[in-house]
Amino acid sequence: MENWQKDLIDMVFDDELCEREVFSRIEDAAIALGFEHVAYGFQSPIPLSRPRVILLNNYPGSWQERYAQAGYLQIDPTVAHGRRSHAPIIWTDQVFAGAQNLWDEARAHGLKVGWAQSSLDGLGACGMITLSRSGQPLTTQELDAKQLNMRWFVQVAHIAFSRLLRCNSAIGSQALSKRELEVLKWSADGKSAQDIADILSVSKNTVDFHIKNSITKLQVTNKTAAVVHAALLGFLN
């Protein structure tokens, strides 16, 4: 196993690494695979009405600013592809035919050759890795030699980042007690407060108390939102 692969595996099991340190290992792996730049996009499954998106990359600062300023995330065809398919996509004139300004400006900033693939985890979080460089087109021979490693890289990077970013989201919520989690699990199964009270041999008022506490801790507005939020953060597994 090559060093960059071992570093990525170690990263998955290291709870002490911060976001910057994780991305640094991602950068090293991208370079080992023959690319100058790497981007990681993360779409959280919550809130459901407007999922939070986090973008990390080592693109030139001028391009990062322009991409955000122009709202290119909303029309980027590679992002649209990644949201509907987990198949890899290679940057081509045809891919960017409907976003010509984006394509022209990206190439003007030295981003001329690229490959991307998305990944979805079991909790609904979507991640996408994009590898790019300024020259040397991707040949069939290079893809045949590297694509398995590139696709493995996407999966490992998403596992590491999604866990880290989900933990960061969870930190913003107060820890739920064992009983609060138990009540939310039964609620997720469609049980009413009275049903749960009978199952746990407590009063309905006690169940309502735990639900109210869960709503407050998760910073949501009702029981349904509390159940969904807790599930998507992995609290109910």
Image (tube, rainbow, N blue to C red):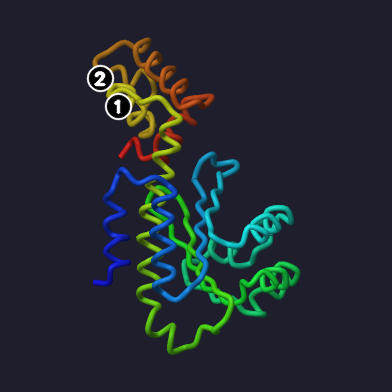
Identify the mark nearer the N-term, 1 or 2. Answer: 1
Disc 1: which residue: 182
Residue at image coords 35%, 25%: 176
Q: Is residue 185 above or below residue 122?
A: above
Tell me the quarter of the picture where residue 109 sits: bottom right
Q: Where in the figure is residue 168, as x and y percent of width and height?
A: 43, 38
The secondary element bearing badge 1 is classed as helix
Disc 2: which residue: 200
**Residue type highlighted by circle 2:** Leu
Residue at image coords 66%, 61%: 63
Q: Is residue 55 above or below residue 26?
A: above
Nearer the viewer's eye, disc 1 or disc 2?
1
Q: Where in the figure is residue 96, as x and y percent of width and height?
A: 67, 73
Residue at image coords 35%, 46%: 17
Q: Nearer the viewer, residue 50 or 34?
A: 34
Residue at image coords 42%, 42%: 166
Q: Is residue 142 above or below residue 171?
A: below
Q: Where in the figure is residue 76, as x and y percent of width and height?
A: 65, 63
Q: Nearer the viewer, residue 232 or 90?
A: 90
**Residue type highlighted by circle 1:** Glu
Left or right of 97, for residue 147: left
Number of other residues with Cα within 10 Å of mark 1, as a class: few under 14, some 14 to 19, many 20 or more: some
* Cα–Cα gap, marks 1 and 2: 9 Å
The secondary element bearing badge 2 is classed as helix
Image quadrant where one finds the N terminus: bottom left
Q: Where in the figure is residue 170, as x and y percent of width and height?
A: 41, 34
Left or right of 101, for residue 43: left
Badge 1 vs badge 2, beta-carbon distance below 8 Å: yes
Number of other residues with Cα within 10 Å of mark 2, as a class: few under 14, some 14 to 19, many 20 or more: some
